[in-house]
Image (cartoon, rainbow, N blue to C red):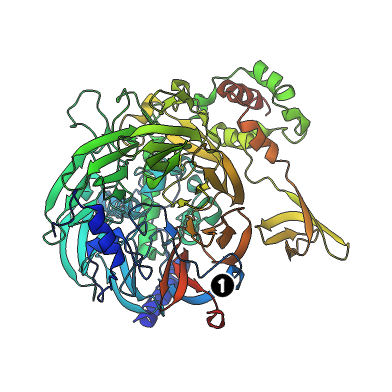
Amino acid sequence: MKRSFGAVLLAMGVAILACQATRPPIYAASDGFQTNQSSGSAVQDAAADVAKAGGELFGQNCAFCHGRDAMGGETGPDLTRATLVLTDKGGDKISEVVRDGRPQKGMPSFNFSSEQLTSLVAFIHSQAAKAKAQNGGRRGVEVADLQTGNRELGKKYFYGAGGCSKCHSPTGDLAGIASRYEGLRLEEQMLYPRDAKSRVTVRLPSGETVKGTLAYVDEFVVGLRDANNTYRSFFTSNVKYVIDSPVDAHVEQFSKYTDDDIHNLMAYLQTLR
Amino acid sequence: MTFLRHNWSLASLLLLIALPSPLVAQNLDPADLLNPSPDSWPSYHGDYSGMRHSKLTQITPKNVGNLTLGWAFQTQHRDTIKASPLLVGGVLYFTIPDNVWAVDARSGHMLWHYTYPPNKGEHIGQRGVGIYKGWVFFTSPDAHLISLNAEDGKVRWIVEIADVNKGYWATMAPQIVSNHVIIGVGGDLDNLPTFIRSIDPETGKTQWQWNVTPPASTPGGSTGGTTWMSGTYDPHLNLIYWGTGNPTPVLSGTTRPGDDLYTCSIVALNADTGKFVWGFSASPHDTHDWDAVETPVLVDGMFHGRPRKMLMQASRNGYFFVLDRTNGESLLTVPFGPVNWALGIDKQGRPVPNPAKEPAPDGRLIAPDEGGLTNFRSPSFDPKTGLFIVDAHPSWSIYFSKPADGDYGWAGGDYDLWGKGVIEAIDYQTGKIRWSHEVGSGGSGAGVLTTDSGLTFTGDAQGNFLALDTATGKTLWHAGSGGIIGSSPTTYEIDGKQYVLTSGGGVLFAWKLPDTNN
């Protein structure tokens, strides 16, 4: 019974992959799949039904983290403001994340049928359209909400108590930062740039050293990408290694910030366009 | 089944301990829960104390390095196992949402698999079953209680716990005390009242219900306080101890001024009547989603030179609490990691929330994050060393809330910035951390089990199972699971062989010493 159950699952997986390749896009763009349907109310009703089915699926599997309205909840981001959703075309990006999950961020993968995925994507897009239509009174974090700081005090903090200028420069790595990120995304990046890379130097028993970008580490294995981008790993019991992780300074800073420091620093960083 | 009452005497308890209590097939006398045999793990926490500490000593710090795989069981589902498997009569019972399995504890082969019909409840997790006599009790995503026949997994009856259409769900493992199946409910995406309820194991009828918050019509009253973790029990006091979840609306407290009792609290109820005896508010007026449902661990021992009946909790809000469990009085309140949201501790040992750290339109930097300094994963208390060992999660986040977020459900947003996992060994008399053991970036979902031989079993953020030396925290054994660890280890001895049971992703692993070593 176990075996046949596994075979069914495997078959379902293959079916999903096959359907993904051939599935026609039933809604067009990210900014409101309903408004792009111009051929009459029957089509709109059908699309609304698909989104409704997607909403139920969302409620069972996604709402706990992303909120029942997809506008943010426990741990999961507000999907109606997510770049991935806003740049998704016909489910191309959303489907991939749902199928594969994001294990590093704690998002599990889901084994949905292609119809289920279609409905889920339709629901998320309809929620994004709904949120966008809420001009002004919209729930969630707006760029305008994050303008309570003082840029002069922020600059002072940057060069003084914050110690930011020890590693960063407004004309170097931070030049144009406010053009690359805005609002909440900029603030998150400022407080902890989660994609920052660490370097690792591994000394082998022979005395040889291997340097690279840290790719993996636990108590037992350390892995790196060397200058050729080749992955190499070592048992930590066999080697000595040193990790250089400048981003740790951001962790040190958490307990030192006041909320005003953060808002002031935001005001200053937003001048770096 | 009425003999197990509050006047249960010490003499009869000792008599029960002295007599061998062989388990007959898949049948669990509720009296066996008072003193579980080594070849069983008959309730979520293993026993009523919630210490998750085993007397078994076959696997030791010296030989644990030889630990080898006895068997693995693949659910072939994507859900991460969050259940503690129950072991009764040589059969393991465990779950993921909508699914229950019965598996032979010797071989890992499946006896039966029950699937609950598709339903629209929240499928966030499932923490396992409760067993009474020959019946298995299971809660469904759409908030129903299902009674199954332990022999074959056939449905006996199904009763509704709460209305899924209002936003309720259920994830918890029912607590069995005497002839009571004690259950709770989940659902904080909506402003809903919650409760702890006792069900008759034979008929499915409600025996008693205790409501967490005052009636919905109470001015300034809150809703919420979900009861999503199986509690502990003191048979001498005949009190069950449960934690309650956050109030709703979650991140905005303006419509619910005051302490929002008894949300985010530890409560003591009479097991037979549900009568409220005492409550301790772990997070008065919570606005950060810090459910106080983490295991209320019951320990009898010395505290500052006096014998005490204690209750200990490492709480999601970042504080380690020691209470006198006879009356709920505070003995110790101390943070066990970075915490920045309280002005201090009041006379009753409760953290005093800082109004300036409530979620705000322009954001507030908060430690710990919403997942908390720990969560539902079990801690363990090791009696020999006096160490309370917990999988902690030092972390920082930003919390937002503004009028446009409304006063229903979540009512705001919060964003995790950074966190890591650390196994901490806390001295329960001082709150000082005797040793800590880093378990990786992001944090680990593994709970903790200790054994009398001086071993601590847990896991890391990358999915490695770990055995540590309880005295020092040093790693003695490890094995990669290939998945996220979302459950707490258990152990049992069958036919003279000790097993340690762990899970990674949707796979259950049974570890033992090589046969030649026994």
Tag 1: amino acid: Leu
Write down the quadrant of residue B47 in the picture.
bottom left
Question: Where residue A204 sits: x, y (%)?
Answer: 83, 63
Q: Chain of mark 1?
A: B
- Using the rendered image of the protein, determine whether residue B137 is visible from the camera's viewpoint: no
Question: Where residue B147 sits: x, y (%)?
Answer: 20, 64
* Vertical side of B413 occupied by A1: above or below: below
Residue at x-position 42% and y-position 33%: B331
Q: Circle 1 sits in a helix, a strand or a loop, which is it? A: loop
Question: Where residue B213 sits: x, y (%)?
Answer: 24, 34
* Vertical side of A121 occupied by A153: above or below: above
Write down the quadrant of residue A74 in the picture.
top left
Q: In the image shown, does A130 or A205 lie closer to the viewer?
A: A205
B10 relative position to A105: left or right:
left
* Vertical side of B236 occupied by A114: above or below: below
Crowding around mark 1 (Cα neighbors within 10 Å: few <14, some 14 to 19, many 20+) is some
Question: Where residue B443 sits: x, y (%)?
Answer: 55, 49
Q: Which residue is mark 1?
A: B67
Q: In the image shown, does B254 or B214 lie closer to the viewer?
A: B214
Which of the image's four quarters has the N terminus of chain B? bottom left
Residue at x-position 30% and y-position 74%: B89
Q: In the image shown, does A141 or A238 lie closer to the viewer?
A: A238
B449 relative position to B152: left or right:
right
Residue at x-position 45% and y-position 69%: B507
Residue sitting farthest toward the right: A207
